[in-house]
């Protein structure tokens, strides 16, 4: 039981590390699956930091599908409240499974209706040849089979 409480506290601390959202016309959401394991969120915060450093004019937020917080609806509402009109959604998924095919379009439609936002949804990681090549190179190098 102590470990569960400790993991919950860690998850709450990590979720509070989300970058403050500055006012802009466009913003980006890194859409991730979500996990109850607090360590799971670390690479997404690292990705958020890298994108924010390379493109500081565009606020970068993280949203989760389940069970982590904040969720997509909360993040889009927060962005809309700051004056954002267009949101670029980067689904950080390897493939177009049910969440990307079914859940994401429903979430986007709801946010468009509720907040009048426009969306650009990027492809999943597995649809980008350069990323697949990078992953293959890493696997080959890590396995020492090159």
Image (cartoon, rainbow, N blue to C red):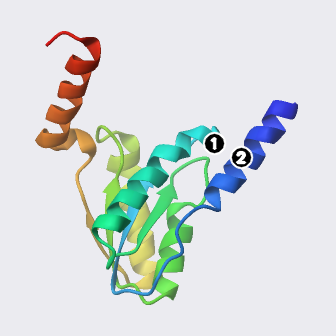
Residue at x 49%, y 77% (from the top left corner)? 21
Residue 96: x and y, percent? 29, 42
Q: Please give the label number shown on residue 121.
A: none
Residue at x 52%, y 70% (from the top left corner)? 75
Secondary element type, mark 2 = helix
- Mark 1, residue position: 38
Q: Residues within 10 Å of mark 2 (few under 14, many from 20)?
A: some
Foreground residue, 103 or 23? 23
Residue at x 34%, y 39% (from the top left corner)? 97
Tell me which corner region of the image, top left, top right, bottom left or bottom right, holds residue 4: top right
Foreground residue, 46 or 97? 46
Residue 142: x and y, percent? 28, 18
Foreground residue, 110 or 122? 122
- Mark 2, residue position: 10
- In-image side of 52 versus 9 (left or right): left
Q: Residue furthest right?
A: 1
Indicate which disc, 2 or 1, sits on the residue closer to the N terminus.
Answer: 2
Residue 3: x and y, percent? 81, 31
Residue 129: x and y, percent? 12, 40
- In-image side of 119 versus 44 (left or right): left
Query: Which image quadrant: the C terminus?
Result: top left
- Residue 14 lies, with reference to residue 120, above or below; the image says above
Residue at x 52%, y 87% (from the top left corner)? 81
Q: Is residue 10 visible?
A: yes
Mark 2–mark 1 contact, CB under 8 Å?
yes
Secondary element type, mark 1 = helix
């Amino acid at each position: 039981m102590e470990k569960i409480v400790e993991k919950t506290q860690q998850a709450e601390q990590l979720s509070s590390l989300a970058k403050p959202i500055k006012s802009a016309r466009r913003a980006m959401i890194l859409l991730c699956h979500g996990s109850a394991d607090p360590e799971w969120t670390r690479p997404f915060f690292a990705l958020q930091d890298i994108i924010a450093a390379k493109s500081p004019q565009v606020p970068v937020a993280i949203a989760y599908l389940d069970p982590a917080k904040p969720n997509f609806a909360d993040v889009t509402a927060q962005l809309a409240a700051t004056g954002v009109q267009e949101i670029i959604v980067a689904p950080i998924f390897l493939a177009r499974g049910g969440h990307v095919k079914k859940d994401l379009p429903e979430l986007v439609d709801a946010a468009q209706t509720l907040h009048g936002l426009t969306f650009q949804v990027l492809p999943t990681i597995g649809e980008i040849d350069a990323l697949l090549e990078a992953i293959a190179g890493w696997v080959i190098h890590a396995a020492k089979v090159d």
